[in-house]
Image (cartoon, rainbow, N blue to C red):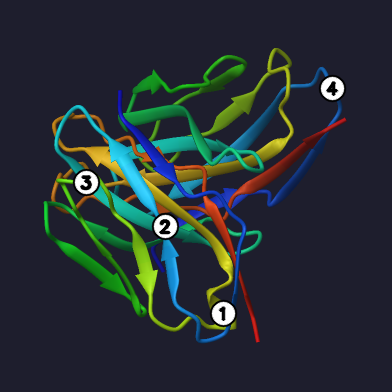
Amino acid sequence: DGGITQSPKYLFRKEGQNVTLSCEQNLNHDAMYWYRQDPGQGLRLIYYSQIVNDFQKGDIAEGYSVSREKKESFPLTVTSAQKNPTAFYLCASSMASEFLFEQYFGPGTRLTVT
Amino acid sequence: GDSVTQMEGPVTLSEEAFLTINCTYTATGYPSLFWYVQYPGEGLQLLLKATKADDKGSNKGFEATYRKETTSFHLEKGSVQVSDSAVYFCALKDRGSTLGRLYFGRGTQLTVWP
């Protein structure tokens, strides 16, 4: 089955630690995205990548970092510089085609930092 | 810049009631419009989309018509079911942009009672 996997589903960390969230897709999509979801705020874009070895900051990139070394993988690191890291994180991917465009989402990772 | 405004929730309905969730947008280009649905604890799923003015997207009894003159894309369903309880997100993609990012509204929580 084609799709996006995110692991783990729940993640707990102590304040001051970096943590990396995994995102893998087997849809052969060129573009991948990371969103953060907080209650009542919708989805906010953290980073996105349209091709391997290239990525752009979204609206709330501070305190986060990404890499895109392989087409199917787009891991997100939440660094200790992120002031409010507790949130639900969603990864997505899409084709580059304008008319076939659709973003597919993974099941999400809920990160709790205490 | 591009943005989406959707009606605030929560929306509570009885089973078989008529549903409308309002969505209006602002775009610098000529956008494609989407409705996504999120069930508890899950990622987002595409519900329907429309890529040009007067297009009607439809799926699972839900419909939305792309109205360029009113910059709107309201979601409707004639008879809701308990299983429709979820959070609904309106989103746009600027077709004039080569970047694949989506702009999301804040989401509307729908609860349907039997």
Label 3: which secondary element: loop
Circle 2 sits in a helix, a strand or a loop, which is it?
strand
Q: Which residue is mark 4?
A: A15
Q: Which residue is mark 2?
A: B36
User: Chain under label 4?
Assistant: A
**As drawn, A17 above or below B27:** above
Kindly identify the amino acid type of the residue bearing the numbered disc 2.
Answer: Tyr
Q: Residue placed at 82% from the left, 17% from the top?
A: A16
Residue B22 visible somewhere in the drawing: yes
Whether A86 is drawn above or below B41: the answer is above
Image x and y of residue B96, in percent: 13, 31
How far apart in space, not on screen, are marks 4 and 3 (Cα)?
A: 47 Å
Q: Nearer the viewer, mark 4 or mark 2?
A: 2
Of mark 2 and mark 1, the one earlier in the sequence is 2
Label 4 vs label 1, nearer the camera: 1
The residue carrying pointer 2 sits among few (fewer than 14), some (14 to 19) or many (20 or more) residues within 10 Å by Cα, namely some
Residue under the point 64% across and 62% down = B40
Are discs 4 and 3 less than 8 Å apart at CB?
no
Q: Which element carries disc 1, helix, strand or loop?
A: helix
Q: Residue furthest front?
A: B70
B53 relative position to A6: left or right = left
Badge 3, how many Cα within 10 Å: few under 14, some, many 20+? few
Residue underneath mark 3: B70
Residue, disc 1: B83
Q: Position of residue B107 (x, y in %)?
A: 52, 49
Query: Which amino acid type corresponds to the residue marked 3 in the rendered image?
Result: Thr
